[in-house]
Image (cartoon, rainbow, N blue to C red):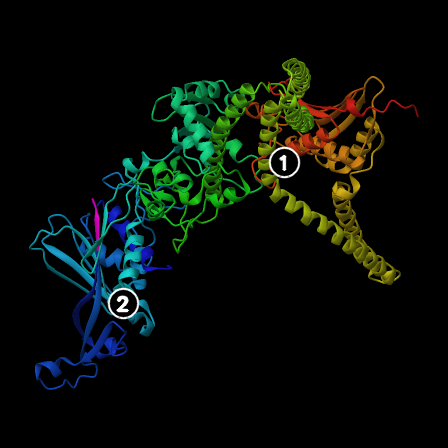
Amino acid sequence: MTDPEQAILEIVKNAYDADSKDCTIEVDTRATGTLEHTSVASALSRFGESTDTVEVELFTPEEHSGQEASDESDPPLSRRLSYTGKICIRDKGDGLSAEAVRDSWLVVSNSIKRVESGMPKPKTDEGRTPLGDKGLGRLGTMRLGDILLLRSAQEGSSTINIAWFRWKDCDGAETLDSIPVQISAEPNTGGFKGTEVIVLGLNDLAKWRDERRAAEIAFSIAAIVSPFESIKTFPVSVRIDGKSYDMEQVTSDLLAQAVSSFDFKFQKDDGQSDDYRLVAKATFRQSVFTASANPEAADRARSVFSKDHGEEFLAWLKQSKKLNKKYDSLEISPGGDWVIEIEDQTPFSRITKGNQSVIGNPGQFSGALHYFNFGRSGPAAAGSGATSARLKRVGGIAILRDGFRVRAGDDWLDLARSMTSGSTYHLRVDNTIGYFALSGEHNFRLTEKSDREGFVGDQYYRGFEEIAKKCRDFSNKAQEDVRRGLDQYLREIEISENNAAGMSSKAAVKTVKSSASSISAAAKTVSAIAETQRTAIATLNSKVSPLERADEALDLAQQNLETMEKLAADFDKMRDLAAAGAVVAQEIGMRSEQVAALVESAAVGLAARGLTHELHTHLSEIERSTSFIRKTLQGTEFSEKIRPQLRYIDLARRAMSGAAAQIDPMLPRTRAVKERLDVANFIGEYFAARKSDLEREGTRAEVVRLDGGLVVRMNRNRLLQVVDNLVLNSRYWLQDDGAPVSGDRHIRATVDSRGFTISDNGPGVEPKLEETLFELFVTEKPNSEAGQGLGLYITTQLLQLDGCTIELLDERNGKGRRHKFRVDLSKLVDTKAD
């Protein structure tokens, strides 16, 4: 065990297992006292070594009684232990009988709680599932101090059973049974019931006496139990040198200041008894929108909710086709405490789909995450009681087993990673608290490590980890979707107010350019008017005759009228400037977010570029070396033995060369040249180059040419990226559990006079993703190794560079899912004859 807190936790677990209603931990660094016992010289003489906090004195009984020394061959010998420092962990549980102390507590690694591997432990009389294991509570006390003393009594017992021994004696003992152990009893005059585990002669006494360090240890000890009111089942109190320390409590008042909350239940599927499902629910307060780091955005959000409690926006959100398809349910409550509620359910089989490791079902459990906004707009956004320091004392996201915290690392759920590589709307480490509540009854297959530093990384923990990550991802996506919903709503309002509906970004840029020219012309016109007016007024003032003045004034008015008409024409050209400005501003904002999101992927691309260059060099060296070895061994006795190995090396080299060739065409230097391409032939050659891989996967690929096919003028490598992404997606999902068996799988590319369609007989597109499939980081693939949700987005952007498009066709397969991707290349059709 790495620290005293964990050692104390194991003893507290024993108190819980004994059906105690609570537990007290008292540390007295100034406590002193002595323990004495007598045996024979052969049993005690080698156990006389002192420590910093336990002084040992060996003496014969006669030395203190004044009697003459015994002349026996193995005379009596006494030992006095003078200790400094004391820890007492007291409970009011069942207590131990004298037999249990002797036959169980004093026997190393013997525990009445032990059961067969893979089976749940029997419950206690109070219905608790025991948490202690293998006598770790007893063994852990050696991290605390030198002498371990037990006092225990059962209800109604007339005596208190006592046993004690010294850990330091283990150094001088050859066998366990030679360690001096004292067993005794004393009258139970006070009606004591329960157990006291007392450690005397404390280790690291200076640390316990340091007030700052003592406070850290005390709070850490207090944190061994759940800080959440709803999960707190076993009160633990801590006192160090007379000062009490209490763990920060997560009360309902504190949770009422969270701007969003997420609740999870992993439970047996009602429809299928052999499967489980995760039921995830997200709820959002109005303050999730109005508390923003951007003052302008916060003001706009407040204006939305101050007008009608946000009813118009919430009604718009309720009708969102994207959100309604993505989640199982979406409810709104204008004016309520929680204004938005989203729920989604995911079968366990889908959570683990595509994972190459063996994944086990950890059993049912629940969890909750709570997000606070004080880090964005100050304490007022979350309430005066919710501060960063207070949440830090709670300890982030806890894994609890029957209310006791299991160590798992500061950011075991990896929230920091999603902060840096995901959306700005995702959960943040310092702003999020929560728990996953396990139980010994249902999650007995999850095994803690012997050092109690987390769980053993077996199939059941991997299953729990995958479910927890799914909970995290649901929370991030739900919060992002809801907050981006307000952004989209405000964009639509702005577009409507500026009469910009239907204006494309290209048209907006053209309008801005045109308006800029009109503004310049208008400015020149205004300057000319001003100069003309000054000259005309001076001339007018010089005229003496009223008639001449009238004629001059009339001419001036006529000139001004003509100039104003010209100016009005210039202003008329600028009437769409506000609309164009709104469109351009929104386009810049969205592009900025997309660029930021793609920076990390771009870094990977740069690394791939360097790797490709180096790879070609190394592959050439491997080819030369294998050729040299083959020639050198030719005609020798080793030739036949080595030749098969060289063949495998050649195959591996060609495979790596092929992979590098896939990256080469994607580099910037190769993407500028356009050439004439027969699309059907191009895709046919693509399939032929991958024939062996497709056959190994049990997949048949074919090209169907309609209307004579299609010839385009396009960059070869850009078309390769489009085809490659679509086919790789098909190949991935054809390996899914819901796909046809090997040999019955097929991919079809249908080429007509305007473009091509890629389809397969796999499971099809998940209905929840139909509206968002071409957006950044949208994927149904279960992990980042399988896919990051970039392929279809990049494909869309590449096609748009040439004025082309991609869409998911409405046609559905036998499972009711859309499954055909249509690429329109009509803008690139080459009409020239061969």
Q: Nearer the viewer, residue 209 or 43?
A: 209
Split into 4 quadrants, where in the image is the N terminus?
A: bottom left
Left or right placement of residue 622 versus residue 315 in this view: right
Label 2 vs label 1: CA separation? Answer: 57 Å
Magenta stretch, main secondary structure class: strand
Vertical arrangement, residue 389 with respect to residue 788, above or below = below
| Marker disc for residue 790 | 1
Q: Amino acid at mark 1?
A: Leu
Res 118 visible: no
**Could you say whether the residue bearing mark 2 is in a helix, strand or loop?**
helix
Q: Is residue 485 left or right of residue 735?
A: left
Where does residue 691 sit, x and y in percent of width and height?
78, 35
SS category of the residue bearing label 1? loop
User: Label 2 sits on what residue type?
Assistant: Leu
**Circle 1 crowding by C-alpha within 10 Å: few under 14, some 14–19, many from 20:** some
| Residue 205: x %, y % from top left | 27, 67
Mark 2, mark 1: which one is toward the viewer? 1
Q: Residue drawn 74% across and 43% down?
A: 663
Tell me, yes or no, if residue 212 can be seen here: yes
Q: Earlier in the sequence, mark 2 or mark 1?
A: 2
Q: Residues within 10 Å of mark 2 (few under 14, many from 20)?
A: some
Q: Is residue 719 magenta?
A: no
Q: Give the camera-side residue of 355 and 800.
A: 800
Q: Is residue 534 left or right of residue 832?
A: left
Which labelled disc corresponds to residue 205?
2
Of the pair 546 and 420, the residue shown nearer to us = 546
Segment colored magenta = 21-25
In the depicted structure, whether residue 832 falls above or below residue 351: above
Q: Nearer the viewer, residue 529 or 252?
A: 529
Marks 2 & 1, CB-CB < 8 Å contact? no
